[in-house]
Image: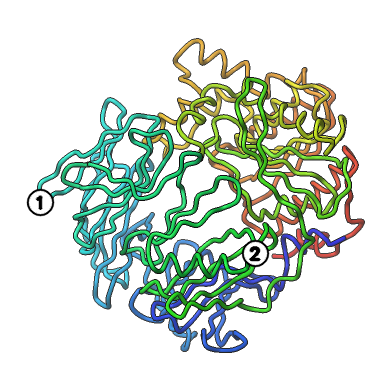
Amino acid sequence: MLSASRFYADPWASWGYESSFDGTLLAWWGTKGGHPTVFVGEITAKPLKAFASFSGPLLHFSWRDYANRLLLTEGDRLFEVDPRRPNGRIDVTPQGFQTWQIIAEPSAPGARQAVISHDRSPVFTDLYTTLADGTARQLLEENSGRTESWLLDADLLPCLRVERSEDGARRYVARLADGSWKEIAALKAEETLIIWNADPHGLRYEALSNRGRDKIALVGIDPSTGQETAIAGSDAVDILDAIRFNPAEPTDLVVIRNGFPRLVPISKRGEAFAELVSSAGRHADFEISGASKDGRIIAASVSFDAQQPRAMLFDLAGKTALTLGPGPQALPATATTPVEIAARDGEQLSAILTLPEKAKTPLPAVIAAHGGPARHENWGFDRDRAFLASRGYAVLSVNYRGSTGFGKRFQALGFRQFGRAMQDDLADAARWLIDKGITVPGRIAIQGESFGGMIAALSMSRDPGLFAAAIIDYPVVDLPFQMEHNPASWALFTEQVEQYFGTPANEADARALTESSPINQVERAEGAFLLTAGEADSIVGAEQTRRYEMALRKAGRAVTAHYFAGEAHGYTKWQTKLARARAIELFLAGCIGGKAKKFDWRTALARYWK
C-alpha cells in the first residue's frame, strides 16, 4: 500500500507547465530539497531538462507577454527575471499600493498594465495603471462603491462596468463607440452573466449567460443593444468551461460536462486540440496551464479515464502532442463513473462514484459533500478520491440540490434547504450505495469542508445511525454568528448568500439559522467526529470549530481534532495536506474498517520540515 506522502508530497512530481510568449521555453513547478521550486527548460530539449531554477517563498509565476522573462511572486513582492541570467532579479512590484492585483499585463516594453487595489476599502477596488516596472501609477477609475469589476479593451480603457444598484440588481454598463455609456443588462439574483472582451476594440463581447434560459450557454453579445446570440449550449448542464487559447481572441473550445466530458470545438485550434486529446480513444479531462501568446503551443494537465494526470504539450499547428517530464510515480488505478441517484421526491441527483479498481463489494464507503454550496463535482481525477480508494473505500461525491452546473431550477431547489432537503439528498445517496450492494449499514462515513462540513455535521444529527463517522474540515457550525461576521469582501455579493441562508432580520429565517446550526444539535449527534481547521482562517474562523469540538466533548461524543498553524480557509501546505490525510486514514480505519499504512516516515517528519 502506498504511503500518504506519495499522494500529497511526491518529491518527483512536476506540474503547472507554462510556455513562454514565443513558445520556445517552458516553466513549471517541482520540488528541490522538499521546497517548491520553479524550473525553466527549452521546449525543444529531448528529454526536457531544466537549465535554471528558482526557489524561495514563491507563490506564483508567469511569463511576460512580450519577452522570455519570468514574473515571480514572493509574498507581496513581484520580481522579473531573465531565466538565462537567473541572478539578475528586478523588483517590479506596483508602487504606491498596500494591496494590488494585476488584471491586464503590458503588451510591449514601455506599455502600461492595469492594476486593481483594495487600499481604500476591503469591499471594492479602484482601477489604476502602471508601467511594467511598477512605476508611474495613474488612477484610471475611482470606484463609486458599487462597481464589482471592469472589462478593459486592448488599450486598457474600461469598456464595461459591472455595478450593484441600490435595488440590489447587478447592472452591466457598456461604453459605446462614441464614448457614452449605456446599460445593456440588469440581472436578477438567480441569473448569471460573465462577459469577457473578444474584440480588441470592445465592439463585440462573448459571455457565459443564462438570461432567458435555465442553463448557462456560450453567447455573443452586441454591446450597443445587449442582444445575445447563442454559440454553444446544452439542455442538460451549464456550459462553464469556455476555453480561449489566446485570451485576446474568441473562444476555441467548450466542454460539456454531462457525465463524461465532451469537447465541442468552436475554432480550428479547438478542433486540433480536441482531436489530439481524443485520439487515445479514452475518456479525458484536462486543465490548461499555459499557452504561447499566439495560442499555438498549449501546455495542459491531462487525465485519461480519471487516472493520475500527466503534463502534456500540444502543438496545434503541427498537430502533435508530447508528454512532458518523467511523469509522477503511478498511483493505484480507480474506477470512476458518473452516476444518477433518484432522491426521495423523484429529483435526479448527479454524482461521481469512485471505487478501487477490481474491488469486491461491499466496501466501507465515504459520502463526499462539496462546499460552497454554489459549487459542484465533476467526473475526473481527484486526489482525495484516489487516496480514499487506495485505502479500500467507495467514494460517492454528491451534487445535492443547490449545486451549480445544472441550471437555475436545480440550484434554486437548494435555497434555504440546509438541514432539510439537502440532508435528504445525502441520506438518499448513502441508501443508494446500500441498495446497490456497494456498502452495508454501519460502514458509511460522510465528509465535507466549509459549507459541506456544515451539512456533514447536520447529517450526523438528522440521520442517526446512517453515518458512523464524519470528517469535517473548517466548517460553518454557528450560522447566526457566521451571518454576522461574513467577510467584508462579500458585501457586493450578499444576494446569493441570502438566497441560500435567508435574511437574519427575518424572524423565520433567523429561527431556521439557529435551529439548523450544528452547534445546537450536538445532543442528537451520533457517531465519531474528525475535525480540522486552519488557525489563520478569516472566512469562517477556527473558533467555530473549537466551540463545536468543546460542545461535542461535553455531550460525550468521540472527537479527534487537528488545528493547522498558518493555514486559512482551504489548505495549501503539503505538510498540512499530508498530516490531514494521515489523520483521515487512521480515523476511518478505526470507525468503518478501511486500511491504513502502519508507518510513513515522511508523514512523521512533515511537521518538522520547514
The number of discs equals: 2
Secondary structure at numbered mark 1: loop
Query: Please, what secondary structure does the residue beneath circle 2 have?
Result: loop
**Residue wearing tag 1:** 179
**Image disc number at residue 469:** none
Q: x, y percentage for residue 202?
A: 20, 56
Residue lying furthest top: 507
- The answer to whether residue 182 is left or right of residue 548 is left
Q: Position of residue 502 (x, y in %)?
A: 48, 21
Please tell me whether mark 2 or mark 1 is closer to you in this view: 2
* Type of the residue with mark 1: Gly
Q: Taking the image as drawn, is residue 74 in sight?
A: no
Q: Residue drawn at (46%, 80%), measured in percent from left and top?
A: 318
Inspect the image, locate mark 2, and give the three-letter code of the amino acid beneath it: Pro
Q: Which residue is mark 2?
A: 309
Please tell me whether residue 14 is drawn above or below residue 534 in the rendered image: below
Where 206 sits versus 533, above or below? Answer: below
- Furthest residue in direction left, as rendered: 178
Q: With respect to residue 347, does 58 lie above or below? A: below
Of residues 25 and 563, the one nearer the viewer is 25
Q: Is residue 54 left or right of residue 385?
A: left
Between residues 546 and 165, which one lies in front from this camera angle? 165
Quick check: can you spot residue 533?
Answer: yes
Q: CA distance from mark 2 to mark 1?
A: 48 Å
User: Earlier along the polypeptide chain: callout 2 or callout 1?
Assistant: 1
In the figure, is residue 516 to the left or right of 243? right
